[in-house]
Amino acid sequence: MKIIIIGAGIAGVTLAGACQREGIEVKLYDKAKKLRNIGGGLLLWPHAIRYLNWLGLGDCIIPYRVSVKGCQMVGTKGEIIFTADYSSFFTLIGGEVLPIDRSLFQQLLMTHLSDSILQLDKRVIEIKEDTHQATVFFSDGTQESADMVVGADGIYSTVRKNLPHYAIQYTNNCWWGGMSERKHVPSLASDEVFVAIGKGKMCIAWPAHGDRFMWYLPIKMPAAQLASQEEGITQLQTLCADWNPQVQQIISAPPSAQRFHLPLYTLSPQPVRSTSRITLIGDAAHSLGPILGQGANQAIEDAFVLINCLKRNSIDIPSALKYYDSLRYEKAQRLSELENQSASTMINDDMEALEAFEQQIRCLDLATIYQDLIPLVDEKACHTLKSNFIEN
Ligand SMILES: Cc1cc2nc3c(=O)[nH]c(=O)nc-3n(C[C@H](O)[C@H](O)[C@H](O)COP(=O)(O)OP(=O)(O)OC[C@H]3O[C@@H](n4cnc5c(N)ncnc54)[C@H](O)[C@@H]3O)c2cc1C
């Protein structure tokens, strides 16, 4: 079997590594001339780490473990409204959450790939399929065929044009983020997550490997008001000028990797993400939004499920893809709903609603806050998913 994967983000690189380990002929193409550091970090949850381990790709992240013990949330009036110890939460979800630089993680996954698999500077413009194969057309005039093509080409996927009904939606939030050394904000604990709630905005800082921290700051605002690349941080400082002093320090700390800011769009999952010979994984299939920190984790889960569907039914690709679709929609849909609910509660400019939230969260614990998410990501969920591939 030969597979062409379009897009060398977390989704594409994970699937390419899994294909290589299974002895499947695989080619990975990306339009970028160079894989650049787009800045920022992400949270790898234990279920994704478990899938990486099951795919034989998990070893690379072991040296980057960060000890995160708890969390503190500061409300709109500057007082602490919530604290939590993570140990019992980590037991519930079956392991620790690992904060890691997005680019570092991508590079670590790449170390599993033979040199011949990835080719850069190859922009896909069209894909055609017949009953036997799918053919990819590149902007440089070349083309290549394979038994199937996987679109791992992100939220603005070109591959997705082969599938109906998808539409991206603006979340009404712009996101800033970056990574810095902790010495620039000594008040941040080395093992604690800091969250500050503001009117129409919030700030989240996670400890990261190498005595650094990664931060995100979403603000409710129209996408058209977002400043240019050069002026992004100045705009953020202005928008946060009257807010929490610790937040001011976090966003003004000298960056250790490129900062980013972007208008945030999401893509709701659809029941059908495959044709006979073309399918989607990662953000190309469902872009969830970052509040619950599940996007990359679901991309890895997609790769795990897809490779196992193909192993289970390698001679009938259309049937394998139908099975893949059937295993992905419900969970992606549920996560998308939970993400949207969390985003509208946490990034809120209605002060009355925010004050009600602040009162409510004082009485909650992490198990209650995440009660709907936990069954989707805990160890039992992983084994249930895996059991779909165990022949009776
Ligand atoms: C602010 C922010 C914070 C986040 N935090 C978290 C978090 O904590 N935890 C988490 O799990 N997720 C998080 N996410 C989501 C996560 O980053 C993504 O879900 C994840 O990276 C999966 O990406 P992907 O590989 O599907 O797509 P991408 O990373 O978008 O990669 C797509 C690739 O396809 C290539 N490409 C696109 N079009 C073409 C074409 N026509 N031809 C060839 N190549 C093409 C691109 O160059 C790119 O390399 C966050 C996202 C944002 C925006």
Image (cartoon, rainbow, N blue to C red):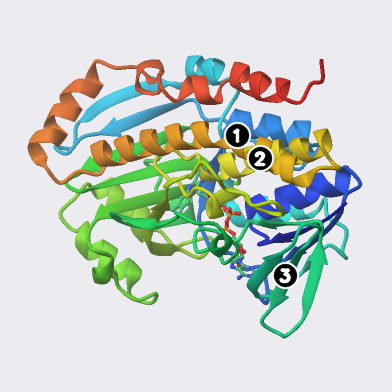
Q: Is residue 61 visible?
A: no
Q: Residue at x 73, y 85 (%)?
A: 141
Residue 322: assigned label:
2
Q: Which amino acid, mark 2?
A: Lys
Q: Which amino acid, mark 3?
A: Val
Furthest residue in direction right, as rendered: 23
Measured along the vertical axis of the image, is residue 5 above or below residue 228? Answer: above
Quarter of the figure that contains the C terminus: top right
Compare residues 236 and 184 and report the one nearer the observer: 236
Measured along the vertical axis of the image, is residue 147 above or below residue 74? Answer: below
How far across and down, in percent of the image, does residue 357 sit?
19, 29
Measured along the vertical axis of the image, is residue 292 above or below residue 83? Answer: below
SS under mark 3: strand
Q: CA distance from mark 2 to mark 3?
A: 21 Å
Residue at the disc numbered 1: 326
Give the crowd class for mark 3: few <14, some 14-19, many >=20 residues within 10 Å.
Answer: many
Q: Residue at x 47, y 40 (%)?
A: 293
Compare residues 295 and 240 and report the one nearer the observer: 295
Residue 136: assigned label:
3
Give the crowd class for mark 1: few <14, some 14-19, many >=20 residues within 10 Å.
Answer: few
Give the crowd class for mark 2: few <14, some 14-19, many >=20 residues within 10 Å.
Answer: some
Nearest-to-viewer mark from 2 and 3:
2
Q: Residue at x 53, y 46 (%)?
A: 42
- In the rendered structure, the answer to whether residue 73 lies left or right of residue 40 reads left
Q: Which amino acid, mark 1?
A: Ser
How far across and down, in percent of the image, does residue 112 sit?
82, 50
Label 3 CB less than 8 angstroms from ligand 1: no
Q: CA distance from mark 1 to mark 3?
A: 25 Å
> Are the residues flagged by discs 1 and 3 in contact, CB closer than 8 Å?
no
Furthest residue in direction bottom, as rendered: 141
> Are the residues flagged by discs 2 and 1 in contact, CB closer than 8 Å?
yes
